[in-house]
Amino acid sequence: MIGFDIAAVKSERALGNHQPLLSLVGRRERRIHDYASRLLGSRLLAKIGASDIVQEVRIDIVLKFDSFRGTSSSEFDAWLMKIARRRVLRARRTFVSAEKRCVGLEVPVSWASSTVGRDRSPSSILLAWELNARVEDALQELKASDRTIIHWHNRDKLSLAEIADRLGISIEATKKRWGRAVNRLRAVLESGAS
């Protein structure tokens, strides 16, 4: 099936063939994934991945497609994003509002693995955890672009060249952006310490 023919998708579905519908959704998975990642934010992404949201959206689409009344590709895209947003809001209620698997009390895996095998006192572990929490809070105060470049370089361990590639800018410009983002993070941390 090439293009967007909602009538053909509905006809195939009436015959019990879900493949055209799944194919339509499949071509939009990257967009749904990126949208869900942005809505989830870094703290919630530690609990539920954007790919989980994509899978839930796929299930919802199959179950709720008969209620879709649109006829165009843009209406279908808007409907998909609305479903993705609802799924993210449900995840937020589940994990944050209800404090299920309390986000605020957890330590990132990267930090926890760095403490394994070390002889550390409870007080030093608590201090490290508190510092990590301060950094996380400070990151949330930065612009999304600053947060992203810091996460890519420091958490995802991407090289500046890889980040430059993703951003479509030179390595030199990437170095400057990363440096400015780190300086802004430092300023937020220092203003919170006083």
Image (cartoon, rainbow, N blue to C red):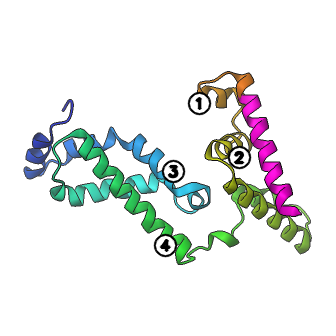
Q: Position of residue 165 (x, y in %)?
A: 61, 26
Q: Earlier in the sequence, mark 3 or mark 4?
A: 3
**Residue that carries the numbered disc 4 in the rendered image:** 94
**Residue that carries the numbered disc 2 in the rendered image:** 155
Residue 51 visible in the displayed image: yes
**Residue that carries the numbered disc 3 in the rendered image:** 37
Residue 22 visible in the displayed image: no
Residue for point 86% across, 56% down: 190
Magenta span: 174-194
Label 4 Cα neighbours within 10 Å, binned few <14 / some 14-19 / many ≥20: few
Residue for point 67% across, 41% down: 152
Q: Position of residue 38 (x, y in %)?
A: 52, 50
Q: Earlier in the sequence, mark 2 or mark 4?
A: 4
Would residue 58 be counted in the magenta stretch? Answer: no
Label 2 Cα neighbours within 10 Å, binned few <14 / some 14-19 / many ≥20: few
Q: Are marks 3 and 4 in contact (CB under 8 Å)?
A: no
Picture mark count: 4
